[in-house]
């Protein structure tokens, strides 16, 4: 198969919480509280949703995708002419706001970008492991 998919992994605790809340939503729906059940199921599916990119080398297409429990959604686009690959370390900031309090945490991450047509780029992989990032970059270089 000539398709390669890179999807950001959902943390284990978030997966467990998402699946259990989805089951709770189904049970709530079964007891006749339809609106609450649908709301809980929708919220749990948003917790289980992740982003990524998929390449089809046979037809020379790619798509940015959203994945929900292994089911991928996204529109295919033709490959642009990629000029070079960039692997670099950066810090990723996350802000959490609760009523009036806000906290920001940052963590180191390694991004792999494919550049085309000047400064346009496509982020294809995100990791914290340097050897894994270079392994994926070497795969794209050969492809």
Image (cartoon, rainbow, N blue to C red):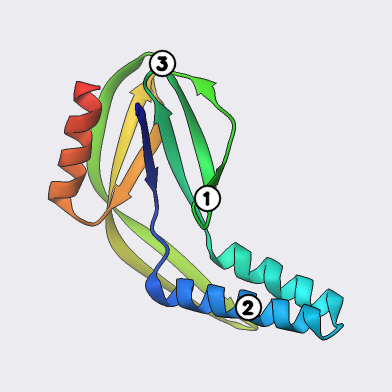
How many C-alpha atoms fall within 10 Å of the one at disc 3: few (<14), some, or many (≥20)? few
Q: Reading the chain from its start, which is encountered first: label 3 or label 2?
A: 2
Q: Which residue is mark 1?
A: 67
Residue at mark 3 to residue at mark 2: CA–CA distance: 47 Å
Q: Position of residue 72 (x, y in %)?
A: 54, 44
Tell us which disc is closer to us: 1 or 3.
1
* Residue at which label 2 appears: 23
Circles 1 and 3, Cβ within 8 Å, touching? The answer is: no
For the C terminus, the quadrant is top left
Q: Nearer the viewer, residue 136 or 89?
A: 136
Give the mark, 2 or 1, whose residue is nearer the N terminus: 2
Element under disc 1: strand
Q: Quadrant of the N terminus?
A: top left
Instruction: Evaluate whether residue 13 shows in this view.
Output: yes
Distance Cα–Cα, label 2 vs label 1: 19 Å
Taking the spot 55% from the left edge, 26% from the top edge, the residue there is: 76
Determine the secondary structure under disc 2.
Answer: helix
Q: Nearer the viewer, residue 63 or 27?
A: 27
How many labels were placed on the picture? 3
Residue 49 placement, left or right of 85? right
Image location of residue 56, percent across then percent down: 41, 25
Residue 2: x %, y % from top left: 35, 26
Quadrant housing residue 123? top left
User: Which residue was labeled with disc 3?
Assistant: 117
């Amino acid at each position: 198969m000539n398709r390669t998919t890179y999807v950001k992994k959902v943390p284990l605790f978030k997966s467990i919480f998402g699946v259990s809340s989805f089951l709770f939503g189904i049970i709530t729906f079964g007891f006749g509280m339809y609106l609450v059940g649908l709301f809980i199921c929708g919220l749990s599916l948003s917790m289980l949703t992740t982003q990524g990119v998929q390449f089809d080398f046979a037809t020379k297409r790619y798509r940015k995708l959203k994945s929900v429990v292994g089911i991928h959604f996204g529109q295919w686009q033709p490959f642009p002419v990629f000029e070079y690959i960039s692997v670099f370390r950066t810090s990723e900031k996350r802000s959490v706001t609760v009523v009036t309090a806000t906290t920001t945490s940052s963590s180191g991450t390694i991004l792999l970008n494919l550049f085309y047509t000047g400064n346009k780029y496509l982020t294809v992989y995100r990791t914290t492991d340097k050897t894994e990032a270079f392994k994926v970059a070497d795969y794209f270089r050969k492809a």
